[in-house]
Image (tube, rainbow, N blue to C red):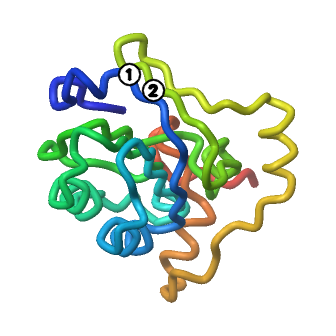
Amino acid sequence: MVKIAAVAPAMLKHTGPARIYNSQEEACAGILNGQVKEGDVVVIRYEGPRGGPGMQEMLAPTANIMGMGLGEKVALITDGRFSGGTRGACIGHVSPEAAADGPIAALLDGDMIHLDLQERRLDVQLTPEQITERLSQVTHVKGRVKSSWLRRYASMVTSAHTGAVLAVPEI
């Protein structure tokens, strides 16, 4: 999901290396510490319905990108969500999410990502076989949630593309 009206014309097409973060907090620290450079594609994963759990709103990283003067020079992709106030090349609700073995979990720092928002395309320069191989080796982020109720929710919730609803167990 992307709000195209809030994207600078120069960013409607963008190709750049992935800068991977496994949480919103990790991404904010990286942005503020100067790890993110002009041309990068910031990828924030494990913030979707299962990974968050609950789909955190990504206002802090987008505000930090703007504050660092990178709003028209950096794209952001996440399995988390955005509010109506988000601007820039920010793509959210990527689904299936990382915690559900979506392709976003296979990305590594430096992978080249190409956005063409006019054509509604988001591509990574990897073959389907490379993505499958990487996904077979992924170690998911665990242990962020202390609440037993949220752990239960995370184990039963579906990804955003299916509504982020609780799956009904078969009896």
Question: Who's the residue at 36% across and 75% down the image?
Answer: 29
- Tell whether label 1 touches label 2 (CB within 8 Å): yes
Residue 151 is situated, as x and y percent measured from the top left of the image, at 56, 76
Closer-to-camera residue (62/102) = 62
Residue 64 is situated, as x and y percent measured from the top left of the image, at 22, 62
Q: Which mark is residue 13?
A: 1
Rendered image quadrant of residue 102? top right
Rendered image quadrant of residue 115? top left
In 3D space, how far apart are the residues under numbered discs 2 and 1 (Cα atoms)?
Answer: 5 Å
Question: Who's the residue at 55% across and 56% down the image?
Answer: 157
- Residue corresponding to mark 2: 115
Q: Which mark is residue 127?
A: none
Q: Residue flagged by tag 2: what amino acid is it?
A: Leu
The image shows residue 23, relative to residue 2, as above or below, that is below
Q: Residues within 10 Å of mark 1 (few under 14, many from 20)?
A: some
Sequence-wise first label, 2 or 1 = 1
Q: Residue flagged by tag 1: what amino acid is it?
A: Lys
Q: Is residue 13 left or right of residue 10?
A: right
Rendered image quadrant of residue 9? top left
Q: Quadrant of the N terminus?
A: top left
Q: Secondary structure at mark 1?
A: strand
